[in-house]
Image: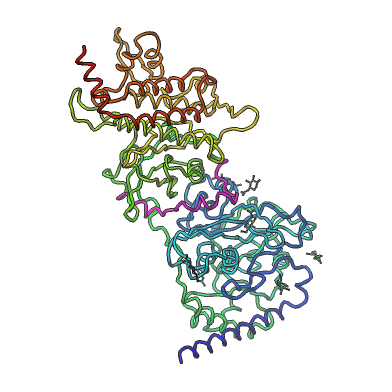
Amino acid sequence: MMMTMKMKMLRLCWWVKEVVLLVVVLELGAQVKVSGQQSYVNNHQLDCYKHFNSTDGFVCDGVSSSASTCSSFLTFRSIPPYDSPVSIAYLLSSDASLIASANNFSSDVDPIPSDTFVLVPVNCSCVPLLFFQHNSSYSLKSSDETYFSVANNTFQGLTTCQALMAQNPSIGDRNLSVHKTLQIPLRCACPSPNQTAFGVKYLVSYLVTWGDDISSIAVRFDVDSQSLLDANMLSSSDIIFPFTPLLVPLPTDPSAVRLNQSPSPPTPPPSPQTTAGGQSNSTDSKKWVFVGIGTSAAVLLLLGLSAFIFCFLRRRTRSKDYAAKHESNPNANPLPVSTSSDPDHSPLPDSKSSWSISSGGVQSAIDSLTLYDIKEVQKATNFFSQANKIRGSVYRGSFKGDDAAIKVMKGDVSAEINILKRISHSNVIRLSGFCVHGGNTYLVYEYAESGSLDQCLQLQPQPYSSHSTTLSWKQRVEIAHDVGDALNYLHNFADPPYIHKNLKSSNILLDGNLRAKVSNFGLARVVGNGKDEGLQLTRHVVGTQGYLAPEYIEHGVITPKMDVFAFGVVMLELLSGKEAAATNKNKNNDNKEELLFDTIKRVLEGDNVREKLRGFIDLALRQQDYPLDLAFSMAQLANLCVAQDLNSRPDIAQVFVTLSKIRSSTHDWDPSDELQRSSSLTQAR
Ligand SMILES: *[C@@H]1O[C@H](CO)[C@@H](O)[C@H](O)[C@H]1NC(C)=O
Ligand SMILES: *[C@@H]1O[C@H](CO)[C@@H](O)[C@H](O)[C@H]1NC(C)=O
Ligand SMILES: *[C@@H]1O[C@H](CO)[C@@H](O)[C@H](O)[C@H]1NC(C)=O
Ligand SMILES: *[C@@H]1O[C@H](CO)[C@@H](O)[C@H](O)[C@H]1NC(C)=O
Ligand SMILES: *[C@@H]1O[C@H](CO)[C@@H](O)[C@H](O)[C@H]1NC(C)=O
Ligand SMILES: *[C@@H]1O[C@H](CO)[C@@H](O)[C@H](O)[C@H]1NC(C)=O
Ligand SMILES: *[C@@H]1O[C@H](CO)[C@@H](O)[C@H](O)[C@H]1NC(C)=O
């Protein structure tokens, strides 16, 4: 019984809808077809299980190949967590600095007040013989999400559920689940040859909202109503609907128009001709107001429409409303933030240009990142309590039971995000997500339980105390091997290859099993290519004394060999337990800077090398046990790495091979042998 009732209702709805559509089509009449460009979606996006040509996208089969890609603009209304150029760029696969400049925002990361109208520059291209679109992707965040909610609520109508389903054929609507990544075709279009001939340069995908009508949109963009109607194959009697994109043809770049002077559209009372009597009160508790200019047949339309709406609302009650909650308390917590004088956190000189994530290949990697809401981050870190502080501006946090390290950084850190999201290696720290709020970026990393290498090395035992919490020889070799592995990956296997530029023991983190993870990519940059074999120059020398290669300090030369140099210093730290640059009082009681890479030269030169090396080795290691031969090999390797002349330094692949040999010999080495040997040695003396 219930079923048949339902069926009847559905059939009635379908019938009503067809009648309404028929009326609309009749209304359009012949005039539209002539100069029409792209057909308006006409609220068909609400009917996910029915196919309409207009819901798939704006067609591009007619365009010439030169018009198959163009710059275009989407529009978006800021809403947390998508309320900064960085986060909107992330959602829509655009570029944060281009968004900031198109909207005259002062920074890439400052929050945009909620519900501000944001222009989003994108490249729009034609999928041959099909549609114009700008590709983005999105990984599902909650089990409540549906194709409809993703299209309408998350992407605000920039795509349709039909297009989503068509372009994600392997993911059925019944098995959408958290972390599934959807391809998102965003609706955009390039001007047709005819439009170009009439001076149209850009088409903006404008999202209709409550209170809009054709003339108010035309005024906002300073175009004439007729061209707006033509561009969307509409006539003046047609109705436009909220959460649908309308193409606005523009002769100039819209950022010149300064649309943000009226951030949210003036909220006019419901226009008189559309709210016939009690319609909006009776059927529509959500203020579902259709805005438009009805002239003839308005009454008939409205009659049909109320039934139409009724049907849609029935359908929609099944899907929930997922609009993100508004931020109630934007300036919650003033935070200690790293300053730019700290070389660890200083912004990259070239960070501006690097946020672009438009190429399709990296999309899947990007979407493994989670964009957190500030409230989640505050909760995870206990409102950045002292107890959660790890060091500097890094806090420990817990997301759904998983520990994470959260680094608070001022300003634009898109460079680091950009690099880490493309890199996947077990010895490179994994970035799991981020949050942008109040001018700060919160980077959420995997948690390294054992802290940083420099801290571990400084856990010196009391002299001659037997018990030791320090790293054993085997552990040190594993750490060196891990770091070598990570650098080898960065220089030779990452796409594109990177120079870390800031390798040091405080940037090497250790997890619970003492596996090393290279972190802090804030200064990293892509290995230059071309004839000069990666030679790049900078005048902006930053880094930490003791790790910087001489050619970089003196001439600003940036090559992968500078990482090799720094890695040599790290190996020396592992061997000696000393800091890369330590201030010692010398005989004359002057403070003298002692650099490890100088010390090793003295150790390995001249006579008595083995004795001098023994003295160089970490006291903590000497109390345990270590194979002096292997330590010697490692010291020699490190010494090669810190060669003054970059051409005599080995490249990381060679270093890694040697380290692998040292590692396998270490596996064969049995501490008890050494113990016997050394004790027999002492006895012999
Ligand atoms: C080109 O556009 C103009 C005005 O928008 C229209 O009058 C004309 O018919 C269009 N031509 C074609 C081939 O669509
Ligand atoms: C919809 O598209 C199909 C094929 O792309 C085409 O044959 C059909 O005529 C289109 N319908 C309308 C109403 O444009
Ligand atoms: C951009 O914003 C700045 C202030 O942030 C203002 O001084 C400037 O006039 C704006 N530019 C335009 C073109 O509106
Ligand atoms: C569009 O593509 C060009 C060239 O590939 C690129 O320079 C530009 O940044 C892209 N624009 C956007 C918004 O991604
Ligand atoms: C579409 O999304 C908007 C928010 O972006 C929401 O207000 C509206 O109710 C949604 N429409 C439907 C039919 O769920
Ligand atoms: C998705 O649904 C189909 C059938 O509807 C099923 O065969 C398949 O196993 C499901 N896939 C997942 C990952 O749940
Ligand atoms: C966008 O995605 C479609 C289908 O997923 C693909 O055919 C097209 O090449 C993509 N466009 C770009 C510019 O990557």
* Image height of 287 relative to 588, above or below: below
Residue 541: image location, x then y, percent = 50, 26
Residue 43 in the image, given as x and y percentages of width and height: 60, 73
Q: Residue at x 19, y 30 (%)?
A: 467
Looking at this rendering, what residue extends furthest in the bottom direction?
A: 1
Location of residue 241 in the rendering, given as x and y in whole percent from the top left corner = 59, 71
Question: What's the image's color scheme?
Answer: rainbow
Q: Left of 644 or right of it: where is 99?
A: right
Res. 392 image quadrant = top left
Quadrant housing the C terminus: top left
Residue 247 sits above or below residue 481 on the image: below
- Residue at 52% x, 18% y: name it: 645
Q: Is residue 669 left or right of residue 234?
A: left
* 542 shown above or below 587: below
Looking at the image, how many numbered discs can be counted on the residues?
A: 0
Q: Using the rendered view, name the quadrant where residue 681 is placed.
A: top left
Q: Is residue 485 left or right of residue 464?
A: right
Q: Quadrant of residue 277?
A: bottom right
Q: Position of residue 428 (x, y in %)?
A: 43, 40
Vertical side of 432 occupied by 48: above or below: below
Residue in front for this viewpoint, 45 or 220: 45
Foreground of the two, 285 or 2 = 2
Residue 481 magenta-drawn?
no
Q: Is residue 355 magenta?
A: yes
Please state the extent of the stretch shown in magenta in the rendering. 353-382
Residue visible at 26% across and 23% down? 622
Q: What residue is shown at x 76% (from left), y 52% (from top)?
A: 66
